[in-house]
Amino acid sequence: MLGFAAGTPIAGRYLLVERLAASPGAQIWSAFDDVLGRPVAVKFFPTAAGDEHSLIALRARARAAARVSHPHLVGVLDVGEAFTVDGAPTPFVVLSLIDGELLGDRLTAGSLSATEAAQIGAHVGQALTALHRRGLTHGEVDAGNVMLTGTGAVLLGVVGSAQLGWDTEAASEYDDVRALGQLVESSVREVPAALAAVCERATRVGQTAGDLATAYAALTTAAPAPAVRPRYAPSRRRVGLAAVGLAGAVVAAGVGGVTAGALPSLLPTGAEPSEWTGSTPGSAPRSSAHTVPGSESPRPAGSTSPVPPGSSTTPGQSVSPSPSGSPTPDPAAVKTALGALRDSVTAGRSLGEITADVAQRLDAQIGDMIIDVQLAKKIKGKLQAFRNRVSLAEKSGDITPVRTTALRAAVDDVEKVNAAEKAD
């Protein structure tokens, strides 16, 4: 049992606030980072104390995981050692504090709708894809390591005994993919045929997390669902209280003044439409009116439409008129243009014109936009964010001017085929 308590300063900057979870292999605390002025989570590993081999493995895993940045993957922020009241060294990692409800807790209240489960599968699949691209596996894809938040599902547990091999052998990418399929299927009481077919694909050798993410995303719609309960709502209040009530302890420990930071608010996620029963994998659900997950307002059916059967596009004609007369982007053309943008990033990295970390972040942004196109979501904002990141990376020397020019040209091509968004 670790001798830490609320108000204990860790590494001269992290003020422990509340113990969130504990097991024989780890303890997780909410904490406040006084240096950057934000709430975080600190995960301690008592099983590794005094074991130099385990400490080296923990540091290596934390550093590798910290290089993976994805909106549906918990962020690794720091790694170090703390000392208990007995003077025993205890390794820890600092993670992003995710505000939401654990999927395991949500399932105790009842099964998910098929759409909710598919949406979670898409998000977790994207997170696994980001890990696998870095040569990392997860090993514990289950309901206890998925947090439901206002922006979707977030995969937790990227640094733990399963990844370090303390309990069992390290998992393979196939193990992660199969576990993802089992997670989605077990979350729904009556699994529709379309969802069951995608989950079955997870058992086949050769299927990647990206394959499943795309397949699950194709099954999602945007009917509203009950809002998730914020798991850390009490922690939000206690972070504020710690800033005041524990200020003396912080100053005495040599840590500066504490100011509480706000955590993300929660929003509803998607629910299941009634037409799911007869759908097939990859087919579009039928609905009279729907809201795309993350969009601002309901979009009546017919306000946008895919390219009519038999029509085609050319480099000079990237959009087709809808029945109402307003142009709509051709999803296939937009995804092709985004693929060319991703190829430019890959080429830049291979040629040493983009640093590995920046290339990984740019690639993740492109992957998110491809999924958004699949879901008929607007990407103008994300394209601008991509441009901004390229500009900042050029100024910092992480992208060469030559590659910056190529990337901007590729973004221009994406905007041309996506130009119909301007008419929305």
Image: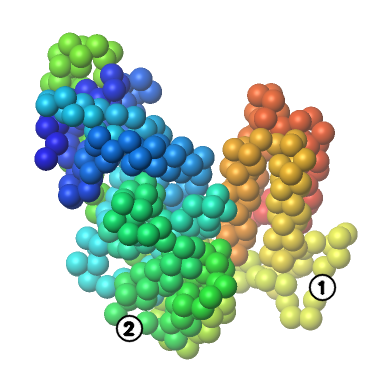
* Residue 205 rendering spot, x and y as whole percentages: 53, 75
SS assignment at label 2: loop
Check the picture and name the quadrant holding the N terminus.
top left
Identify the residue at image location x=41%, y=84%.
192
Between tags 1 and 2, which lies in front? 2
**Vertical relation: 342 (above or below) 216:** above
* Residue 207 rendering spot, x and y as whole percentages: 55, 72
SS assignment at label 1: loop
Q: Is residue 308 left or right of residue 15?
A: right
Q: Residue furthest bottom?
A: 278
- How is this picture coloured? rainbow
Q: Is residue 273 left or right of residue 343?
A: left
Disc sitting over residue 312 in the figure: 1
For the residue marked with disc 2, what is the amino acid?
A: Glu
Check the picture and name the quadrant holding the C terminus.
bottom right
Is residue 144 or residue 110 the one in the foreground? 144
* Residue 206 rendering spot, x and y as whole percentages: 57, 73
Disc sitting over residue 247 in the figure: none
Q: Quadrant of residue 62?
A: top left
Identify the residue at image location x=71%, y=42%.
349
* Residue 198 rendering spot, x and y as whole percentages: 49, 78
How many numbered circles are shown? 2
Asked whether the viewer can see residue 329, the reply is no
Tell me which numbered mark, 1 or 2, is placed earlier along the sequence: 2
Asked whether the viewer can see residue 136, the reply is yes
Identify the residue at image location x=44%, y=86%.
193
For the residue marked with disc 1, what is the amino acid?
A: Ser
Identify the residue at image location x=21%, y=26%.
83
Residue, disc 2 = 190
Q: Quadrant of residue 99?
A: top left
Per the model, the C-alpha gap separating discs 1 and 2 is 39 Å
